[in-house]
Amino acid sequence: MLELIMFKVAIIGAGSIAKKMATTINKMKGFEAYAIASRKLEKAQAFANQFKFTKAYGSYEEMLQDEAVDLVYIATPHSCHKEQALLCLKYKKPVLCEKIFTPSSKDSAQVFEQFEKEKVFINEALWTSFMPSRKILNELLYEKKVIGDITSMDASFKVPLTHKERVVRKDLGGGVLMDIGIYPVTFVFRTLGFDYQDFKIDEIKYKNEVDVKEELTFTYKNGVQAHCHVDGTSIISLFVTIYGSKGKIVMDMVNCPNYIKVYGKRGLLKKFIFCRPKFGGFEFELEESRKAIQEGKLECSQWTHENTLAMAKVVDKVLGE
C-alpha cells in the first residue's frame, strides 16, 4: 500500500479563527496540522499541544524557514495581513490569508503583484465561495431557473460584535464591514455578478471611530437590486432571500447555510436542500488551495485575486479610504 503524502499546513496566529482551522485540518485526510507560530512561544506550544501540531514556533520568520511547510494560513487581524503575506513571500511560501485580505485595495493589489512576480500561490480564504452550497445555488438559479428571473435580493449579517476586540479597535482593522459585511456583499457578487451599475450607501453608523452598521444597495443593468444589511449591534439575523418572477429562495445563513428552501409563486415550499458542511466549511478552501498549488496555479478559481480586489474597492468607498 502506498503511503499517503501529507500536505503540511502551518498557521500564523493562535487566536480563535486559527483554532477553527486547526480543528478542521485534524479531521481531514491527507492534511497535517504541521506548524503553529505565535509571537510568544508559550502560546504556540499550548496551541500545538491542544491541536496536535507537530511543531511550535515563537517567531513567524523562524517557522517560514521550515522547508517542510506546504501552505501557510494567516489567521491574524486584518491590519497584519499585508506584512505577514509579504514575509511569507520572502521564503516562497504559498499563502491562504483569512478575510478580509487587506484593509485596502491598494495594499491587496501590491501583495498580489509581488506574489505573481515571484510565481507563488496566494488566495483570500473566503470560505463561502468554496462551499458546495454555492454550486447548488447557481444550478437552482441559472441552470434550472426554479424561481424564474431574479427580481431582487436581501442579504443580511447582523450579530452583536461590539464586545470583540478585533471589531472595536481601529488599529486592528476593526469595524463590521471588513469583519462580517464581506459575507452579504460577496454573496451578492457571486450570485448576481461583479458588474453592478450602481452602488449606494443607504446608511452607515460609527462608534469609537469604527463602523458598526451599514445598509448598502447594489443595482444592476437589468434593474435588479440587492440590499445588504450589516449590523454589529443587532440581534442575530443571517438570512438570504432571493426573489424571482416564479417564487423565492431562502437560506438561513449567508456565510455557512444549513439549508436552501425553494418556494413557488404562491408561497408553497417546493424544495428543501440540506447543505451544512460536514467539517464546518474550512475544508473546501484547503482542498482547493492544495489542488491549485499542485497544479502550479497562483490562485483558486472559486475566489480569484480579481474578486478580492472588487470587494476591497467596496470597502474603500464605504469607509472612505
Image: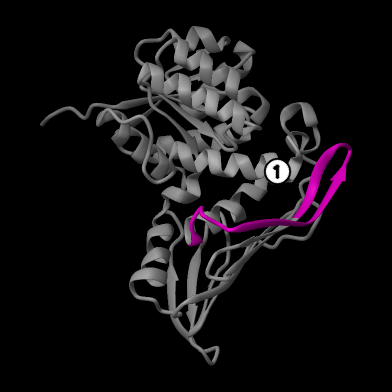
| Depicted 153 relative to depicted 130: above or below | below
Q: Quadrant of residue 177?
A: top right
Identify the residue at the far right of this view: 208
Residue in the image at 48% along x and 12% along y: 63
Residue under pointer 1: 317
Number of numbered discs on residues = 1
Check disc 1: other Cα within 10 Å, few if <14, some if 14-19, many if 20+. Answer: few
Quick one: quadrant of the N terminus? top left
Image height of 238 relative to 19, above or below: below
Residue at coordinates 21% horizontally, 30% vertically from top-left? 4
Q: Is residue 306 left or right of residue 70?
A: right
Q: Nearer the viewer, residue 73 or 142?
A: 142
Q: Is residue 199 left or right of residue 143?
A: right
Provide the secondary structure element on which disc 1 rests.
helix
Q: Is 241 left, or right, of 274 in this rendering?
A: right
Q: Nearer the viewer, residue 58 or 211?
A: 211
The front one of 297 and 224 is: 224
Is residue 168 at all visible to an observer of this figure? yes
Magenta-colored segment: predominant secondary structure: strand
Residue 139 in the image, given as x and y percentages of width and height: 36, 67
Image location of residue 113, percent across then percent down: 47, 23
Q: Amino acid at mark 1?
A: Lys
Identify the image's colour scheme: rainbow, by chain, secondary structure or one colour.
Answer: one colour
Foreground: 278 or 158?
Answer: 158
In the image, taking residue 64 as reference, residue 187 lies left or right, namely right
- The span shown in magenta is 192-214
Which residue, as the protein is rendered here, is positioned at the far left? Answer: 1
Q: Is residue 75 visible?
A: no
Q: Position of residue 86 (x, y in %)?
A: 52, 17
Q: Is residue 21 magenta?
A: no
